[in-house]
Amino acid sequence: MNAITPIEAGVSVALGAPIDVTIENVQKAFGDTPALHGVSLDVKAGELVALLGPSGSGKTTLLRILAGLDAPTAGRVLFGGDDALGLSVQQRNVGFVFQHYALFRHMTVFQNIAFGLTVRPRGERPPKAEIRKRVLHLLDLVQLTGLDKRYPSQLSGGQRQRVALARALAIEPRVLLLDEPFGALDAQVRKDLRRWLREIHDRTGHTTFFVTHDQEEALELADRVVVMSKGRIEQVGTPDEIYDAPASPFVFEFIGESSFLPVTVVDGAVQLDGQSLDLAALGSPHGEATLGFRPHDVSIVEDGGPAITGTIVTERRHGGARRLELEVGTEKHRVEIDMPVDHSRAPGGQVTFRPHRWRLFPR
Amino acid sequence: MSDGAFTTARLHGASGIHFRPVTMERKRVRLALILISLAFLALFLVMPVLAVFVEAFRGGWPAFAEAIFEPDAAAAIRLTLLVAAISVPCNLVFGVAASWAIAKFDFRGKALLNTLIDLPFSVSPVIAGLIYVLMFGSQSLLGPWLKSEGIQVIFAVPGIVLATIFVTFPFVARELIPLMEEQGRGDEEAALSLGASGFQVFFRVTLPNVKWALLYGVLLCNARAMGEFGAVSVVSGHIRGLTNTMPLHVEILYNEYQFAAAFAVASLLAVLALFTLVVKSVLEWRYADEIAATRRH
Ligand SMILES: Nc1ncnc2c1ncn2[C@@H]1O[C@H](COP(=O)(O)OP(=O)(O)OP(=O)(O)O)[C@@H](O)[C@H]1O
Ligand SMILES: [Mg+2]
């Protein structure tokens, strides 16, 4: 079944070629509260971009502006090079999947998916048979064949989410906007749907914006990840770039687990409390900096070389590792490191370690 | 599983521990409360309604039929139906428009509109009637003009309709507003993003989402429109066969000591009330989650 692409099946799902989306210095304020401070972003046709950020960072606001459900206070939005802000919601032709599905509860699954086609003006409306064919095909695509007569209340959360996606795809949108589409689902279903969504995207090729606050989801699914915080874009990059080269402590902390230590950079070497750590600080400016590392990116040092020593505060099981919380240095900064499970250590003892991957952020 | 079994064992077991849910009163107290409310209902609701029917049929079927088909009574019934037929649709349109505006848009004066809708609940119906007399009566500013145009509002059908609309206009809106507010704008936004026009959104999404609450509101509105006494009494003028509605007719008959006839007409109103009650219960039972009233505590 997966071998049949929509194109081969004779029903096009995407309308023509996908388009570029350009966001230029978009600002939005609700009354006096700013929600977006000048966001700029270039998205290539057919790209799947994840908007990732904590609650209140402005992800939904940006999505609603793209859809035309809200107007920006300033800035421009271009769809395929043309101004989109002058277009009404209906004219923009975007598929919007809402966080809470927003399925029409009094309509069957079939009627929900067909809605966007049946409300078209008479001249543009496909004939009934054509609508039926398209809806059934979309049901196939989202793997809900046979559920067309059900009502939304008779579906599980994951199934509702897929109906919402099929409904958005039915109008042959130029851009697909997904607002935390899996937010309300449990972890296992989320994982399945994630993989499935990527597959659908690869088949239909829409330019897609995907909002999430789950970094794992963003990294696994997206071509590029846009990390947002407090109405600003912190970093844009491929999942590798975001994970391996976070541009700020915020991104470092938000993507994956992290520990931070205040350090000093002296002559290209990192020092903690005046002692060298044997970590090269190539290209980092002289002076105060923050050292960031991931708990699992450390090695225990037993040879007495330059390293970080801490006192164990707590020890607990963390997945396949044992996680230690340490107090480090004269100011007792708390950091976390992982050790193999068979290395059980009692609180109060000392551990010496050195990060084998780390990032330095000048302060 | 085992936890549940343990609890049950403790509840019913031979251990002798008497467990009582904290919100559950003692048996005697419960019994007393139930009896008091039942007695109260029987005394003040069931008996009077039964009395109406007993009195209505005291003279048997022929007397009952005569009381109802007698020309003045028939005219009163027709007028009541006419007034309801005009005022209910008016309030339907007003109620839907007002609740749509209040629940789905932000605009200046929203709070004021929301408060004004409740005005008829807080104003005595007699005052409502007087307002219209002051506005359209012969002593009013508009009086001379209305007279020269040959339009009679007070002591005529238009006045009765106006007063009834005033008294009944909160019913539909009060049913719809909480429900629409709870449903939010999500469905409408989804429909818009799918290309629907404003009209399509309203008729295909907004309205179907509230249809049962709407029916419920219309039902209550209708019951009140047919039963309204105070406001209508002020503007009607009590002209037999012309401006008497059913409730007014009942009063006149009663004042003339025609008890059997009065109760016969009253029994029709009682039937309307019972019918409304039954449909209301059915709706509440079947579509509780789509009717706001049941959640209003
Ligand atoms: N209609 C509104 N009126 C006033 N302020 C708003 C409105 N919508 C959003 N905001 C504010 O704008 C900011 C950004 O909100 P937004 O909904 O875009 O966040 P988000 O990133 O989607 O968060 P979440 O992950 O919780 O959905 C928040 O501070 C929020 O309080
Ligand atoms: Mg959001």
Image (cartoon, helix red, strand yellow):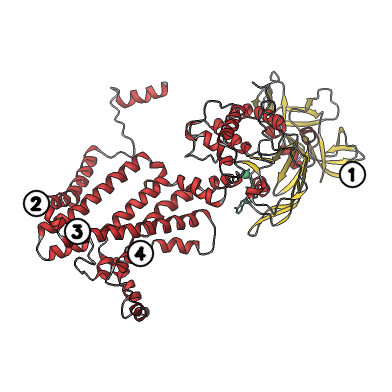
- In x, y percent, where is residue B68? 16, 56
> Which chain does the residue under circle 4 lie in?
B
Q: Are marks 3 and 4 on the same chain?
A: yes
Mark 1: secondary structure: loop
> Which chain does the residue under circle 2 lie in?
B
- In x, y percent, where is residue A126? 60, 38
Q: Are marks 2 and 1 on the same chain?
A: no
Q: Is label 3 or label 4 in front? A: 3
Write down the residue under mark 3: B74
Write down the residue under mark 4: B166
The correct choice, above or below, for B265 with respect to B16 in the image is: below
Mark 4: secondary structure: helix
Does label 3 or label 4 sit earlier along the sequence? 3
Q: How many marks?
A: 4
| Distance between mark 2 and mark 1 Cα atoms | 110 Å
Determine crowd level at label 4: few under 14, some 14-19, many 20+ residues with C-alpha closer than 10 A: many
Task: Please say if the residues under marks 2 and 1 sit with CB atoms less than 8 Å apart.
Answer: no
> Which chain does the residue under circle 3 lie in?
B
Q: Are marks 2 and 4 on the same chain?
A: yes
- In x, y percent, where is residue B96? 44, 55
Write down the residue under mark 1: A286
Q: Is residue B209 left or right of residue A40?
A: left
Q: Is label 2 or label 1 in front? A: 2
Task: Please say if the residues under marks 4 and 1 sit with CB atoms less than 8 Å apart.
Answer: no
